[in-house]
Amino acid sequence: MKRKKIIIVYQYFGTSESKWSTRWFDFTQHFINEGYEVTVITSNFIRSDIKKSIFFKSIMIDNVKVKLFPFGDGNNFSVFRRVVNSFFFLLSTIVYLIFVKADNYIFSSGPITAALPLIFKRKRNTILEIRDLWPDGGFEMKKIPRVFSKPLFFIQKKLYESAGKIITCSPSQRKYILNNYPQLLNKIHTIEHGIDFRILDFSLSYNQNESEHKNKYWTVVGTFGFIHNPYKWLELAQNLIKLDQNIKIVLIGSGPLFNDIKSKIYLNKINNIILTGQLSKDELSKWISKSEFCLFTTLNNIIQQTSAPNKIYDYLVFKKPILIDLDMWLLKKYGEIIWKVDFINFNKDDLVSIRHKKANLNFNAIDSYIKQLNRSKLADKYLI
């Protein structure tokens, strides 16, 4: 019997060993186990662990056919370079899909231009995944001039109407889209990022009692980029040193602001921050396992509040309380373990309060979250 084919267009694909998100790699493996032939069209993303190429390249990775197009995206490039690369990635994808057919096409957007080839395929065969609200986010953060609003929102509407199914990565993204396009109600669904089973395995090996540690580690996993607002951790660190000298903020990750953050820590003599740089999932898990709390923040705007940060799911695996300072959907859905605080004005009463809440965590609810976020179960929902 002929195997069904799935083609996935995703610019940021990596292998099982990636330090970046392995979400789509895990989804491809589930599809393959279900009997599908899977092809991924991707690019030279700076954080991918796939070896870069200046030419078009075809490789096999764990039974996935990977088509590597040499037009990477990322904050390491200028806006002009990103626009040029996005255009050539789009053009190359359109040309490739003219000659190659599949039973299902999944376009993971963000920027949305990567999904444009969708409009040339049969509606019933296409799935559009909205990882980031785009171009909405670009306008909100003033990265795209307003003069482009009409053509870009026209493209957005065309894509939404052309897709057979639309997937968002958070219920808040779904709500945002339905506020603007209520006619999409019956074809828009939410499938979250889910639990990385590697992190889950590491949690069984490394989960420790933080009372064994003199230092109380508060861990942040994230990119040192503008939308993640990393300067806030410097302010929090200077605040915490007055409350508890045993608290150390551990910043895990890299990015365009890493060197500037490192310099500011040195110049301001902030000695309660540990900078690790980018770590493997193994090393990252060791830090989370011995943490008292895990932290998250981003720019405080309507678009970022809908985002679905991967690191939240890593924190959940270790059943560590997660502190955020935004009115995000996460507070409503995962309120047993995600709590809102004011990082800038954090005080002694706040510290006493969160430590008291931590002592009374509802672990049964957290176990339930972890079961619901199994990536094999989530992958099944794409093809229902």
Image (spheres, helix red, strand yellow):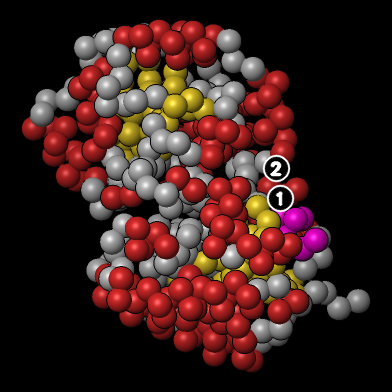
Q: Nearer the viewer, residue 66 or 166?
A: 166
Give residue 174's position: percent from left, percent from top.
60, 54
Give residue 188's position: percent from left, percent from top.
67, 61
Callout 1, which amino acid? Leu
Is 97 situated above or below 126?
Answer: below
Using the rendered image of the protein, determine whether residue 318 is visible from the camera's viewpoint. no
Give residue 150's position: percent from left, percent from top.
40, 77
- Say left or right for 194 vs 1: left
Q: Residue at x 73, y 62 (%)?
A: 186
Secondary structure mostly taken by the magenta-highlighted segment of the chain = helix
Label pair 2/1, CB-CB below 8 angstroms: yes
Is 337 situated above or below 150?
Answer: above
In the rendered image, which residue does mark 1 sit on?
Answer: 378
In the rendered image, which residue does mark 2 sit on?
Answer: 374
Give residue 352's position: percent from left, percent from top.
40, 8
Callout 2, which amino acid? Asn
Q: CA distance from mark 2 to mark 1?
A: 6 Å
Q: Nearer the viewer, residue 248 or 351?
A: 351
Q: Residue at x 28, y 61 (%)?
A: 142
Secondary structure type for disc 2: loop
